[in-house]
Amino acid sequence: MSDVAKLAGVSHQTVSRVLNGHPNVRRQTMLRVRAAIQELGYRPNRAARTLVTGRSQLIGVVTQNSTLYGPSSLLASFELAAAARGFVVSVRRVRELDRSSITAAVEHHRDQRVAGIVVIAPTGPADEALSEVPGDVPLVAVDGDPGRRGAALVTVDQEAGAYAATAHLLAAGHRTVWHVSGPEDWFDAAGRVRGWQRALREAGAEVPPVSTGDWSAASGYRAGQLLARMPEVTAVFAANDHQALGVLRALAERGRRVPDDVSVVGFDDVPEAPFFIPPLTTVRPDFDAVAEQTLALLLDRMAGRGDGAPSRTITPALVERASVAPPPR
């Protein structure tokens, strides 16, 4: 670090501030220091830094071993946000979102002496496990129970997103909207059901029975096979885009055209959604914003700032494409 300071013409303390992302460094000075770091090939000794500062640069994340778009996108966004602040992310994946698996994963991170822990806890058992975590390591939950008090939590407003999707279909002229939901034990799925129901009730529309799936296109296809046989179905809100894809196939096989005969809306805005046939109207959660808020909240707790149980909610946006139209006459 002294060599970097000498080459950049600054003090040892200024180099330290640049390495730690301190905001009170002039841009020109920061650029000189970074250029010196690159020229000398300097790499901070993280173990030594931990011994001197008493703070690790390692953040532990607990998440499900899954390729689901939402959790995987959130994890990727969080890793980028953490790296920009000089932190390394250690990910512990669990096969099941149950109490024992989450507890064991958290204990693994505590043994690593991480600076903080993030748990993506979208189900009841996973969320309940957090109440047993000792308070010696700062912890933030993502997608946990929005009604539970006593935990630092960052969530997407699932209810608001589902409400917007359903209201959009009603505004197109549909008398009611059918729903293909996610798993009943997921908070995301439950929030989307609440938003769908609220939009229908406020409009004075009939609330049809829910078809429950498992987030997969196959479960959407199975639900869509039944819905496609029902001529009264003219609008479907699927709890995620993969289920919407399954619904689209089932409708096509039955000769029900989208959006001429049936309108369909999804949730998540997966990268393939604009290339569905037709391009899918959907709800887009801002995973980058969720990651940034999660990191900011975790850093506050690591520094001993903030109230006892802060909660932050990110509102998703409706993305209108070609899968919605007025109902057939």
Image (cartoon, rainbow, N blue to C red):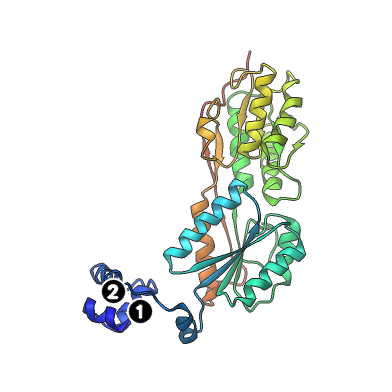
Q: Residue at x 51, y 80 (%)?
A: 55
Residue at the farthest bottom position? 52
Placement of the C terminus among the 4 image quadrants: top right
Total numbered labels? 2
What residue is disc 1 on? Answer: 16
Q: Are marks 2 and 1 in contact (CB under 8 Å)?
A: no
* Secondary structure category for the residue under label 1: helix
Residue at the farthest front position? 41
Vertical comparison of 161 with 2: above or below: above
Placement of the N terminus among the 4 image quadrants: bottom left
Measuring from the top left, give residue 319's x and y in whole percent. Answer: 51, 36
Label placed on residue 87: none
- Cα gap from disc 2 to disc 1, whole angstroms: 16 Å
Mark 2 crowdedness (10 Å alpha carbons): few <14, some 14-19, many ≥20: few
What amino acid type should be assigned to the residue bearing mark 2? Answer: Leu
Task: From the viewer's perspective, tell me whether residue 85 is left or right of residue 192.
Answer: left
What amino acid type should be assigned to the residue bearing mark 1? Answer: Ser
**Label whose residue precedes the other's in the sequence (2 or 1):** 1
Label placed on residue 40: 2
* Secondary structure category for the residue under label 2: helix
Mark 2, mark 1: which one is toward the viewer? 2
Vertical comparison of 277 with 103: above or below: above
Q: Residue at x 59, y 46 (%)?
A: 69
Q: Residue at x 43, y 69 (%)?
A: 86
Task: From the viewer's perspective, tell me whether residue 87 is left or right of residue 67.
Answer: left
Q: Residue at x 58, y 28 (%)?
A: 171
Vertical comparison of 83 with 190: above or below: below
